[in-house]
Amino acid sequence: MNVSILSARNLSKVVPSAEGELRILDSIELDVMAGDSLAIIGSSGSGKSTLLGLLAGLDLPSEGSVELAGQILERLDEDQRARVRAEQVGFVFQSFQLLDSLNALENVMLPLELEGHANARERATELLGRVGLGERLSHSPRQLSGGEQQRVAIARAFAADPKIMFADEPTGNLDSHTGEHICDLLFELNRERGTTLILVTHDPRLAARCQRQIRLDAGRIVGAAEPA
Amino acid sequence: MTNLPFTRLLRLAARQLMRESHAGELRVLFFALLVAVTASSAIGYFSARLNGAMLLRATEFLGADLQLSGSLSPAPQQIDSGLKLGLTHARVVEFSSVIATDQDIQLAAVKAADSRYPLRGNLRSASAPYLADEVSQGPQPGEAWAEARLFAALSLAPGDEIEVGDKRLRLTRVLTHEPDRAGDFYSFNPRVLMHLDDLAETGVIQPGSRVRYRDLWSGSTDALARYRQEVEAGLKPQQKLEDARGGNRQIGGALGRAERYLNLASLAAILLCGVAVALSATRFAVRRYDASALLRCLGLSRRQALGFYCLQLALLGLLASSLGALLGWFGQHVLFILLGDLLPADVPGAGALPALAGIATGQVALAGFALPPLAALGRVPPLRVLRSDALPVPPSSWLIYGTALLALGLIMWRLSLDLGLTLSLLGGGLVATLLLGGLMLLLLRGARRLLENVSLSWRLGVGQLLRHPLAAAGQALAFGLILMSMALVALLRGELLDNWQAQLPENSPNHFALNVLPAEKDAFAARVAALSSETPTLYPVIPGRLMEINAVPVRRAVTKEEGGDNALRRDLSLTWSAELPEGNRLTAGQWWQPLQPGELPGVSVEAELAARLDLKLGDRLTFNVGGLERDVQIRSLRSVEWDSFKPNFFMIFEPGTLEDLPATYLTSFYLPPDSERELVALSRSFPSATLLQVEAILAQLRAILAQVTLAVEYVLLFVLAAGLCVLFAGLQATLDERLRQGALLRALGARRSLLLNARRAEFAVLGAASGLLAALGCELVSYLLYRQVFDLVWAPHPWLLLLPVFGAALIVFAGTLGTRKALSASPLSLLRSA
């Protein structure tokens, strides 16, 4: 597969600050092929999460453009971008972002229900089984460990069959052992479903599992690597 | 997701609501709405039904629900249309006639009534003058009843015959009470009551005779309203339609004020509801920022995300309001059962309207107060899923709050049907909120400096408030509004009750004396003083008619509508007085000043009449008094306590203006019950004087006031209870941040007592500030209300200064109670859940 599903051209983000303008991202150029996995690495404050937000259409760049699944994001309004997210994109977050008021099953059902999916319950049950939580369907997030919560979040992210998966420090809140397991799961599902994976991390071992890596420093791409 | 149909969104919202039903802030919101709608619909029901009951009592003053009266016999279709609507009808014809016996004659006020009269209230009569009376049916054809003073004047005994025109009637009983006499204090002549069937044979009614036809109606409210509609357009200038409210000043005044009070109480309940909703909706919204951002990530549009939450709240609101309306209905039912002894047996029901109004109130309050915080949910940037510090763009608050205020104003107006009340509450509330909120902010900022030298617990507690001064000011304002609503309702209750009691003290005059001759004036005053412990003031009375205003004949000077004013069609009782009579208050101009050469003598005019006739200070009035014309100039306008049972006058002349004309004297005085013997003696000593008993009317009025008082007391309890509930609920809604801080401090090793003290310090300051705001706001709003709505004289209320202490105690108590559990829970669980 050598079709570009995500590309960024001359992408910059500037925010006002007390000391004048602050350039968080500077002239980023990026192409991601369908089915690829890309790790964005860098230290804290290097602009990783900002880049992820721009690539996923959660925020708009100050300059440059992002094309996601054939749509130029900055030409869309917020609701149209929401539609693109709904149809193409899944998310896994560092802080899991499960709804406390819903149990595990309901959390996974949520995107399916929003879509009006006929078999939301069955499909969510199946996905939770796939991530190894088939016995914990009715548990609320507070009753689950961090690793279990992230597995629910992964099941939710894959529920609507996204083409691109954005993962923001998915193991950042987990111990290394649990993190390892979560990564295994993420990559397995990614392969199984042919999803494109964009992963933000500062963990070199995790990054090494991606096909490509780019390193950010002070908002610029300072290095790229394609492991053999 | 590209298109999410409304029904699916609704289903999702409903499901989400059920799944979240255990969430704290939803419970608080539900509870707050429940309490507020329960209180507001219970008050709505209670006041609607009580109003019905009081109106029923008031109708007795008219002897009917509705009266068509006039100097013309009504057209047949005016009667037919009422009968067709199924209304009950009675006819009364009133006129003056000379009553003759074989020895003597006396001018009497004759009333000829059919057998159905009166439709409301009862006639009472006695078998002989000054004996105990009982409820009785009116006289049969061929019979007549008369007041005791007619028996005295003509030396009659029951069984004797009298002549009314050409008809001889047998006097069978002594008339002691007519329900509809109240509006008719100044009918100087003794009453004779006869059957309508005998009227034609008297031959008294001739073309041109001065006769008052009264057609009385009773029936269902709907039918009466329809009748009013049908007849009103075809009324002749000589005719008018009156209901109990318009027909009687004493009752009208008391009812009007009670109604306004009850309305105010339910408005206070709505305000309470609004505050609670605003507090818990803010918490609802803040707690859903993350979820809303997530939903946006999952592909919901801004509008859909907002709709998702609005629908949840709307469903919740509908549920809470419906339940509240039901509870309110039950509540007032229980109240009426508890009050069974004191209320009339036939209190009419109030239908579904108060319940519907309660539900609508809940929904509008929800929309008005929850929308501003909720709107933020639609503006949460989806980026928040990556950066938890990404907060919603601040709302364009003026528009949103303006809309909320407007919606609230509309429902207040609709509920109270009183624009003045609504505007002074809304406007006063708004001004108070802005001023006091700013003041609060300044105070908090100023407190920062003082904080350096106090103990750790105070620094921790008050520091918590100072860290977010805007939020703290908001909370103080919210609790202040709650306290203010409660204080205001309590304040007005006291004021109204005092006012009513002052209006009808235990020994208010229960007798009037008319036609006291000038020569007997001093002797009469001395006799009455001996009987009643107080020296009565006797006012001279001269009948006179207003002819011209500024040299323009009255008929031309005033429009046709005002031409129907009673004051213009009949002789007015004119008087003169050097002093402003007790119970009168100047509203414009000055009391008598020495006359300047060439100046016309002065007159003081009752303010309402002046307003009706468009009279101003300096206007020249021409009166015809005893065939002579007198010119006077308006020097002052007066307000008069019509409900004081003292002689009151539309026109008071400057002394010296009328003294050359023959006058009689008028007074009112109090005699203890069982003074019949003294009364007979008095009337024998002064045969020309007419004595009028108004004890029965007074008793009726007191009964109504007792009911109103009771209603006011219970409504006050309702509002206080609702206020306390809302206060507790609202406090719960602000606890999140405090719990987190507490958990953190305990994790750092703080003792429980330190935290408890810090909390108490914080709540004490918050409570005291709320109390202070409430006291200031209460004074401001009460000032507006007194002046604009209740017509009361305003004076500062020093006891309101206790409110800060009260507020501090209340909020410390409620707040400590609310955080107690959190203080004993493990800090870890709190930190993890935070």
Image (cartoon, coloured by chain):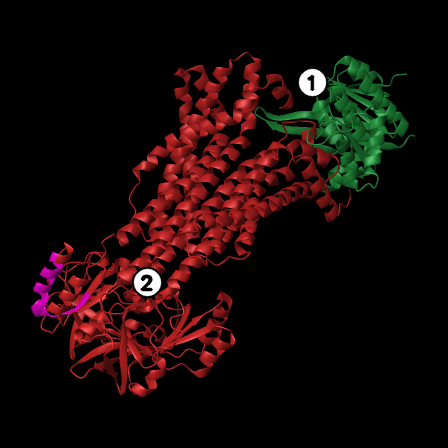
Chain colours: A green, B red
For the question of whether residue B818 can be seen, the reply is: yes
Q: What residue type is labelled 2?
A: Arg
Q: What stretch is highlighted in magenta?
A: B513-530
Tell me the chief SS of the magenta region.
helix
Q: Is residue A84 visible?
A: no
Left or right? Give the position of A190 relative to B743: right
Q: Which of B301 and B67 is in front in this view?
A: B67
Locate residue A190 relative to residue B503 in the image: left or right: right
Badge 1 density bin: few <14, some 14–19, many ≥20, Cα 10 Å: few
* Vertical comparison of B227 with B753: above or below: below
Q: Name the residue under label 1.
A: A44
Residue B314 place in picture, x, y as percent: 63, 45
Amino acid type, label 1: Ser
**Residue at 33% over, 45% down:** B494
Quick one: SS at disc 1? Answer: loop
Is B521 part of what is drawn in magenta?
Answer: yes
Q: Position of residue B407 (x, y in %)?
A: 53, 50
Q: In this view, does A9 lie above or below A209?
A: below
Q: What element carries label 2?
A: helix
**Subunit that carries the residue with mark 2:** B
The numbered mark at residue A199 is none
